[in-house]
Image (cartoon, grey):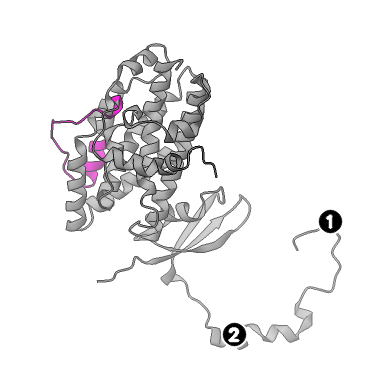
Amino acid sequence: MKKNWPLWEIFVRSKNGLEHRHFGSLHATDAEMALENARDVYTRRNEGVSIWVVESKYITASNPQENGELFEPAQDKIYRHPTFYELPDELKHM
Amino acid sequence: MKDSHLVKYILGIADNALILGQRLGELCGHGPTLETDIALTNMSLDLLGQTRNYYQYVAKISGDDSTEDDIAFLRTERQYLNVLLVEQPNQHFGYVIARQFYFDVFHYLLLEKLQASTDENLAAIAKKSIKEVSYHQRFSSDWIKRLGDGTSESHNKIQTAINDLWAYTDELFEVTEDDSHIVNIGIGVDVSELKAEYYSKVSEVLKESTLEIPDNKYFKKGGKIGIHSEHMGYILADLQYMQRTYPKMKW
């Protein structure tokens, strides 16, 4: 018999207009329980206005051994990075 | 003590929250899973927060220099006016959930009405607390359904707990002499009027959970007038230890 409840990934939208962000993971037997557990574990102090839960097994992750081919080529081509124009001071969080 | 009817009426509500909060607090670090452990202790904190609101109000109207801490920690067993249901031991998760469910359904109905109290302070506390209690009720009802409609083992365990604690449900609707004074002047809620709705709500959830509705007609009562079960002394020993050992101690 499988002893542990399945693992779920929890995404919380902290304010309307912002995107859902990954907050952590927890165990639950189904989606409804995952939502309730997420409420208890992550959003007790007004952290959120919306919760998404996804069973962890449905997430496909990149393989760390392929990090080189996936992520590194971009580093040596500086024209790919949008750093060649100046931002006005008033613009923050860019 | 001035306003002693009102003080006793409020204690009758607040002591339920204190003692159930204490019982749930015992589970801290002992919940069946990390997530339910956190959920149960969150509910404990909700209830203790509500207790503080009531006790602060009682301290204000009691006319002496007692504080919320005195009320929580320095009364004798007979002076606590909570129902017998909330002092029943945790035993196993089924009992924790059944006790919570029986209490939450009542608690919600009570606060719903208490919001209309002519006493502004009580109405405000009720309004503030009902959101939390609405979640408690959802949590415990969901677990009743999961356990009842789960495996045969979970079904049997929750059915036993539901049967065993049934005898403590009727006391929730007792109106003491102090209560009736406060009901008559429009401050208190006549809990006897909540009974029909309570049992129909409870039955609805039990039915959905494939559980049998107990038909035991023998009910235990006494807590509301200070006559408690044998468990109460142990709860108070834990609860009061610090204040009794180090009088006037503060964090």
Asked if the residue at tag 2 contacts the one at tag 1, i.e. Cβ–Cβ closer than 8 Å, the answer is: no
Among the two numbered marks 1 and 2 on one chain, the one whose residue lies closer to the N terminus: 2
Residue under label 1: A90
Residue kind at label 1, given as amino acid type: Glu
Q: Is residue A80 above or below residue B180?
A: below
Residue kind at label 2, given as amino acid type: Asn
Q: Is residue B211 magenta?
A: yes
| Circle 2 chain | A
Residue positioned 76% across, 85% down in the render: A77
Specify the label residue B158 is tagged with: none
At which x and y percent is residue A76?
Answer: 74, 86
SS class, disc 2 = helix
Q: Quadrant of residue B199?
A: top left
Number of residues whose C-alpha sits closer than 10 Å to that of mark 1, classed few (under 14), some (14–19) or many (20 or more)? few
At which x and y percent is residue B144?
Answer: 27, 47
Q: Which residues are magenta?
A: B202-225
Report, in whole angstroms, how far the alpha carbon at label 1 lies from the one at label 2.
36 Å
Number of residues whose C-alpha sits closer than 10 Å to that of mark 2, classed few (under 14), some (14–19) or many (20 or more)? few
Specify the label residue A67 is tagged with: 2
> Does residue B222 show up?
yes
